[in-house]
Image: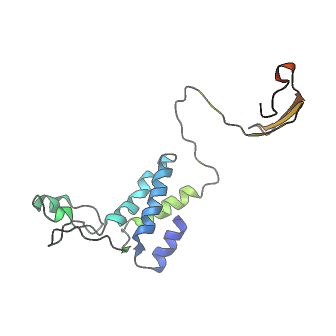
Amino acid sequence: MIQQLQVEMESMSALEHKELECIRGFLVHLQRIFPTITPFLKGIHLTLDGWCPNRDAEMWKDVALDAEDDEYGSSFGLNSNNNLPSVPERVQPAPCLADDLAGLASLFNLAQTPYRLIRASSIHVCLHGFVDASRTGFRSSLSLPNGSLYVRQGVWGQDADGRSSNY
């Protein structure tokens, strides 16, 4: 997605608003896992809202212009008919967007995912394996994180006699 945006910025003067919203939604979701991407999302936020009234040249909201507006003025983006303007299909990229995309591209291009340090009180590991149960016996295998394979096989005891193999 980042590479796609970079290519679009080079070939077009404006970006598709709806597509950029979808990309932002996914990146905001990833931000919970990778908080280091947070400062690089600002260019996307500014690009999506840059069409709104009272923005400066770098698409930041101009608080001084907002303070001049009355209670129901253009700070809400109302036009002369007191209707909200429609969101444009294409938006101009914010001046910082190219640098932010380059930063995101370099973070997502790392050979190994950066560790996120937390103060864990316990550790839980989810392992997946294969199990086969037949009428009188069972066999299971489990791939452990250290690369070894754990295999268990045997026959059911008397406590499982008469039960389904799904037991």
Q: Is residue 149 visible?
A: no
Q: Residue at x 82, y 37 (%)?
A: 141
Q: Residue at x 42, y 68 (%)?
A: 18
In the figure, is residue 165 to the left or right of 59? right
Total tally of numbered discs in the picture: 0
Q: Is residue 102 visible?
A: yes
Q: Position of residue 91 (x, y in %)?
A: 36, 72
Q: Residue at x 18, y 67 (%)?
A: 78
Q: Camera-side residue: 140 or 17?
A: 140
Q: Position of residue 93 (x, y in %)?
A: 38, 70
Colour mapping used in the image = rainbow
Q: Position of residue 7 (x, y in %)?
A: 52, 74
The picture quadrant where one finds residue 131 is: top right
Question: Quarter holding the C terminus?
Answer: top right
In the figure, is residue 93 to the left or right of 32? left
The picture quadrant where one finds residue 162 is: top right
Q: Camera-side residue: 99 or 11?
A: 11
